[in-house]
Image (cartoon, helix red, strand yellow):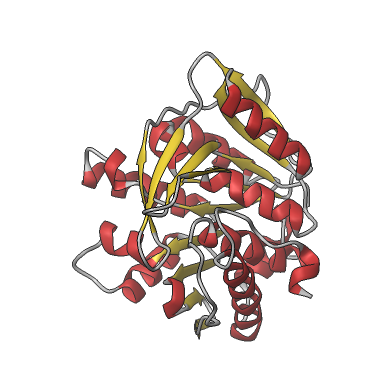
Amino acid sequence: MNPTVIGEALVDVLAPGISAPQEFVGGSPLNVAVSLARLGYPGTLVSRWGHDDKGRTIEDYLAENRVSFVGGPDDQATVIAHGMLDPAGGATFAFNAYWQLPTLGTELDSSSQLVHTGSIATLFSPGELLSMVTRARSHATISYDPNLRPSLVSNHAQTVEQVEGFVAAADVVRVSGIDLRWLYPLRSVHDSARAWLDLGPAVVVATAGSKGSFGVTRAGTVEHASTLVEVTDTVGAGDSFTAALLCWLADHSLMGASRRGELAALGTDQLRQALQFASRAAAITVTRAGANPPWREELA
């Protein structure tokens, strides 16, 4: 499948309360790229970080997980996300955020059957990035996860418009219920997901942590209950879910522009299997500290 993932790479500094903070390589797009690689689909991360110790830590982590990169170190510092963990393992982040789309010189690799993006990158470079992923539709399935950071948003209406632009360009959308409620506070999460389906994607999946997930396709809606596990923290769980969902679709030959029609015809039984697989990946991730997604053999 040779996936291409576009977006931020950073270092999470997680403070669990009375214990000393711990550092983990992170960033939602990076987490998806690493998770895809661990599930058998190594690819390329298009990103940036600084010429500093934390940037070198990111490069080492990508190499360990067989993820290549385009872009890499520049003259700005590596982004640090300071996360405060609550008693349930959820994290609230503050960022010294900086991100810009690296100069690629050429279009994205036309052999890539999957292009995924989301989060800070789509807030900081919305126009350029949207144009890039729209052009990639000629050869790839497009995946998108808003993974919003409200603290970085200055204009709610503008952000809604930008998000909907990416949704319309995507084939697969994974979104948290928290993000949907922030974007559309006057309607239900289910109604918002269905409204997004009408914008063009083949699949829209909304997740709600321990409360489970649901997906909508043109064939109908599927609900899935989460597996109950002991939670260490929830960092990266949504990214693991996204990657596992994409992995399931790739395993069933539903990736690439030539398979867009088959993906649009995804049935409810297929969607149920995909949600089960993705939920198992997320359940493993929350049992471990930081964004540490499972390997393929752990999902066997």
The quarter holding residue 177 reads bottom left
Q: Is 189 left, or right, of 7 in this rendering?
A: left
Determine if residue 235 is in view: yes
Write down the quadrant of residue 272 in the picture. bottom right
Would residue 107 be visible to someone looking at this image? Answer: no
Q: Residue at x 58, y 72 (%)?
A: 283
Query: Which residue is most to the top?
Result: 75
- Which is nearer the eye, 199 or 26? 26
Percent x, y for residue 154? 22, 37
What percent of the width, then of the height, locates residue 152? 30, 39
Query: In percent of the image, x 29 and y 47: which residue is there?
Result: 150
Q: In front: 66, or 56?
A: 56
Relative placement, left or right, of 209 versus 256 is left
Residue 49 x %, y %:
56, 26
Q: Residue furthest left?
A: 186
- In this picture, residue 192 sits left or right of residue 50: left
| Rendered residue at 64%/69% (across/down) | 281
Q: Does residue 103 lie above or below 4 as drawn?
A: above
Relative vertical location of residue 129 with respect to residue 42 in this rendering, above or below = above
Measured as percent of width and height from the top left, residue 296 is found at: 78, 65
Relative to 4, say whether 270 is above or below.
below
- Above or below, 5 relative to 236: above
Instruction: Identify which residue is drawn at 33% across, 68% down.
Output: 192
On the rendered structure, is 37 left or right of 197? right
| Total number of numbered discs in the rendering | 0
Quadrant containing the C terminus is bottom right
Name the foreground residue: 170 vs 273.
273
